[in-house]
Image (tube, rainbow, N blue to C red):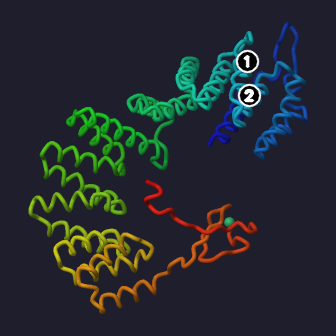
Amino acid sequence: MEIVALLALLAGLAVGKAWERYKLRDGKWIDRRRARDSHHYVLGLNFLVANQLDIAIEELSQAARVDADALEIHLILGNVYRERGQVARAIQLHQALLQRPKLTRTEHAYVLLCLGLDFKRGGFVDRALEAFNEVLRLDPDNQYALLYLQKLHEEQHQWDDAYRIRRRLVDLTGPDTNGRSQAILGFLENERGLEAARSGDLDEAARRFDSALDLDPTTTPAYLNLGDVRQKQGDRNAALNAWERLLNASPERAYLAFDRLERAHSAAGTPHKFEGRCRELIADNDRDWRARLALGRHLAQRRDFAAAFDVLLEALEHNPHGLMVHQAIWNVMLEVGLDRQHVQRYIEAARDAVFFMDPHVCVKCHYRSTELLWQCPHCHDWNSFVEERIAPSRDTE
Ligand SMILES: [Zn+2]
């Protein structure tokens, strides 16, 4: 992300610079191409693209010496220092550039943008905010400044500000083809709703969650949160309605609402409705192991162990790695007294499953294998496999 932004910034500078290739300085026309056309500059950029920052710095420093006035070289040099983690040095370099007389408005904005990134990298949040806001004062349509401001506000959990900035960015760039910018607005609106709920303003919270779903109907957590707020307000039907909407809008995330739906339907005396919804999901998507797991647990709770066992074995068929499925099956087997026939069926189902018997993973490209390999079939690196072990849950808690 950082390096891409850096290169985009370079491209922007090059365009902005093209028209002032020749610049009148102290009454003389100076060929600004001199420094940029030096082989040091070109080499420096090449090493930068290859992510060889140390050599890039060396070459760019040489280029800067050829033409001490070339603003962009110093700007880039500062950026590379920042990328390498030498934030103080980057700040010093960029601040020195701000002292230059006769900076154009565009140049001024670019230097401030780089300085803002230095501050952000160094953890000086307030100064970064200040720098990016100053960029926007000079150049109100600066998308980089808006994006970095949004990120900073998100990091500070300042959701109102983040939303406001994001809205400005979306208005500026127009709707994108993949709907990503609307989706982010939806998530920010959802966070504003959570904030309102935390402060006890449930009506405001519900409004925010509704608005998040208007912005983007795939803002999954907003359905859950809207239902939770309605439940807190004592409106069970509205809560059920919100969670039901999640099942329709994103069936692949439906399982997030299962516990809530099951509890609410039990409380309402309509447990068969929960069972019916699970069966609908399975009918719509034969591979839905989560709906089968929920249905299996639900049936087991109602002591219909034969039906529970069947549906759980089906779940196992579709997700043989899911420990939750195995656990649900163990519970049913215990309930029926480890009856020999049940145990036999479980062992057979698990034997046919495509387990990674001895999971290994390539540390270079994350390719997975069922055994230790000496050369990765995906990235072709040698001796790059390590045993893959998931830490026991108590270690990660
Ligand atoms: Zn690999």
Asked if disc 1 is less than 8 Å from ligand 1, the answer is no
Q: In this figure, which residue is indicated by the disc labeled 2? A: 78
Residue at 19% across, 66% down: 274
Mark 2, Cα crowd under 10 Å, few <14 / some 14-19 / many 20+, is many
Furthest residue in direction top, as rendered: 27
The amino acid at mark 1 is Leu
The CA distance from mark 2 to mark 1 is 10 Å
Q: Quadrant of the image for the N terminus?
A: top right
Against 220, is 107 above or below? above
Q: Nearer the viewer, residue 137 or 320?
A: 320
List x then y, in percent, for residue 98.
69, 15
List x then y, in percent, for residue 26.
85, 7
Residue at 16% across, 57% down: 264
Residue at 85% across, 29% down: 61
Looking at the image, do the residues carrying marks 2 and 1 touch, with CB atoms under 8 Å apart?
yes
Furthest residue in direction left, as rendered: 269
The amino acid at mark 2 is Gly
Quarter of the picture for ligand 1? Answer: bottom right
Examine the image and state in which quarter residue 212 appears. top left
List x then y, in percent, for residue 147.
53, 33
List x then y, in percent, for residue 90.
71, 26
Q: Nearer the viewer, residue 7 or 367?
A: 367
46 left or right, relative to 211: right
At mark 1, the secondary structure is helix
Q: Quadrant of the image for the C terminus?
A: bottom left
Residue at 22% across, 34% down: 200
Q: In this figure, which residue is indicated by the disc labeled 1? A: 97
Asked if disc 2 is less than 8 Å from ligand 1, the answer is no
At mark 2, the secondary structure is helix
- Count the numbered circles shown: 2
